[in-house]
C-alpha cells in the first residue's frame, strides 16, 4: 500500500505545473505542457526530517514535497488473509519564504502564493484510489513558520487501505 500511494503521489504531483501568470495548471503528459509552464513541484522524496537538517542535506529544489507515512494500525478482517486500516500520510510541502505577508507588505501577494500551491496539490490528490487504497483525501493542514528561509506546510491525508494475502 505504501509503495502504491507513494507512486501515485509522484505521478499526480508531476502533472501539476505553474503557469507564467502565477496560476497552476495540469498537463497529463510532458507533450501537453504549454510553453512557459514549469513543474510546480521540483522535488519529491520520502520524509527524513529533511527540514530540520536543511544545512546538512544535499541541495534539493523547492517547492519540494516530502512524504511521511504515520504508523499504520491494521485491523484483521480475515486473520492472516485480509486487513484494513485508515493510514495517515503527511505531505511536507517546503517552499522558499518570499517575504512578509503583512497587510502593508509589498511581498504579501507573492508570499501568499504558497496557499494556491496547496490548493493545486489538493486538486491533484483528492479522492484518489488504487488497488490497495481508497478515498485518499485531505484531513488536516498545518503551517510551520519555524524556519528562517523556508516555509513548511504539512498537508495530512488519510485513506482506506487494504492488505490481502
Image (spheres, rainbow, N blue to C red):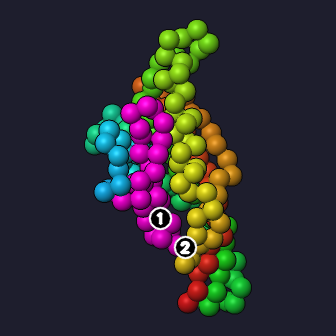
Task: Classify mark 2: helix, strand or loop.
Answer: loop
The span picked out in magenta is 1-29
Q: Report how far apart the C-alphas of labels 1 and 2 lie in the structure.
A: 8 Å
Q: Is residue 54 above or below residue 16?
A: above
Image location (x, y in percent) of residue 8: 47, 64
**Which residue is tagged 2?**
130
Name the residue at 45% across, 23% down.
98
Q: Is residue 20 magenta?
A: yes
**Which quarter of the image is occupied by the C terminus?**
bottom right
Q: Residues within 10 Å of mark 2 (few under 14, many from 20)?
A: some
Q: Is residue 73 visible?
A: no
Nearer to me, 58 or 61: 61
**Which residue is tagged 1?**
8
Nearer to me, 145 or 160: 160
Image location (x, y in percent) of residue 162: 61, 78
Does 151 sit left or right of 40 as displayed? right
Does 127 sit left or right of 7 as displayed? right
Task: Classify mark 1: helix, strand or loop.
Answer: helix
| Earlier residue among tags 1 and 2 | 1
Amino acid at each position: 500500500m505504501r509503495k502504491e500511494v507513494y507512486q501515485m503521489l509522484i505521478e499526480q504531483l508531476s502533472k501539476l505545473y505553474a503557469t507564467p501568470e502565477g496560476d497552476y495548471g495540469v498537463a497529463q503528459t510532458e507533450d501537453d505542457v504549454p510553453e512557459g509552464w514549469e513543474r510546480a513541484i521540483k522535488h519529491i522524496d520520502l520524509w527524513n526530517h529533511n527540514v530540520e537538517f536543511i544545512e546538512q542535506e544535499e541541495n534539493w529544489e523547492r517547492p519540494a514535497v516530502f512524504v511521511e507515512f504515520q504508523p499504520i494500525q491494521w485491523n484483521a478482517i480475515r486473520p492472516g488473509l485480509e486487513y484494513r486500516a485508515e493510514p495517515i500520510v503527511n505531505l511536507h510541502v517546503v517552499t522558499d519564504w518570499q517575504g512578509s505577508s503583512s497587510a502593508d507588505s509589498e511581498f504579501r501577494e507573492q508570499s501568499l502564493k504558497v496557499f494556491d500551491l496547496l490548493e493545486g496539490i489538493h486538486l491533484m490528490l483528492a479522492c484518489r484510489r488504487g488497488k490497495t487504497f481508497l478515498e485518499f483525501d485531505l484531513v488536516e493542514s498545518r503551517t510551520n513558520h519555524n524556519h528562517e528561509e523556508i516555509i513548511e506546510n504539512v498537508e495530512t491525508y488519510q485513506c482506506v487501505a487494504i492488505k490481502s494475502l
